[in-house]
Amino acid sequence: GFLHSDPGDYAWGLNGLDRIITQLLEQLDTSGPPPADRARIHTLPNITITQQHVDAGLECSVCREDFAETEVVRQLPCKHMYHNDCIVPWLELFYKFVPTICL
């Protein structure tokens, strides 16, 4: 057999594969904003779900479960509401992907 393209396009052995993985990891964008400050996350208002919310069919966008009347949820400045146990860990990990209007 012969190669159908440049030999540099192939990973030769474990060292070659390691070089490719290292190169890909170095290309990741790590210049985005840091995770949300815990103090800021915990200042998000708690909202008690009303029958009006339930009738509107509102749900947590993270777990996709409908809200239940009298349930307490977190509301972002953009007015989106989430279960506390869903949004807090998500914000701590993925804050840089949250639209600026939401925080």
Image (cartoon, rainbow, N blue to C red):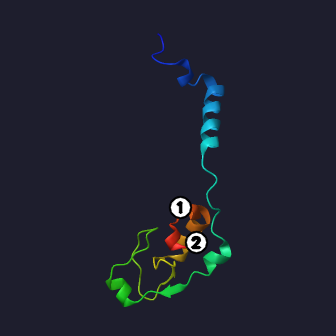
* Image position, residue 57 (x, y; %): 33, 79
Q: Choose the circle earlier in sequence order: 2 or 1.
A: 2
* Count of numbered badges drawn on the protein: 2
In the image shown, does 52 or 95 lie closer to the viewer? 95
Name above or below for residue 85 compared with residue 47.
above
Q: Do the residues labelled 2 and 1 touch (CB within 8 Å)?
A: no
Judge the density around disc 1: few (<14), some (14-19), many (≥20) Cα neighbours within 10 Å.
few
- Tell me the distance, in whole angstroms, between the alpha carbons under discs 2 and 1: 14 Å
In the image shown, does 50 or 81 lie closer to the viewer? 81
On residue 88, which mark appears?
2
Q: Which residue type carries mark 2?
A: Val
Name above or below for residue 2 compared with residue 68.
above
* Image position, residue 37 (x, y; %): 66, 71
* Image position, residue 94 (x, y; %): 57, 62
Q: Residue at x 60, y 62 (%)?
A: 93
**Residue assigned mark 1:** 97
Q: What element carries label 1?
A: helix
Judge the density around disc 2: few (<14), some (14-19), many (≥20) Cα neighbours within 10 Å.
some
Q: Which residue is drawn at 38% across and 85% down?
A: 53
| 2 or 1: mark nearer the eye | 1
Q: Is mark 2 on a helix, strand or loop?
A: helix
Q: Residue at x 64, y 54 (%)?
A: 31
Q: Residue at x 44, y 86 (%)?
A: 49
In the image shown, does 101 or 48 lie closer to the viewer? 101
Quarter of the picture containing the C terminus is bottom right
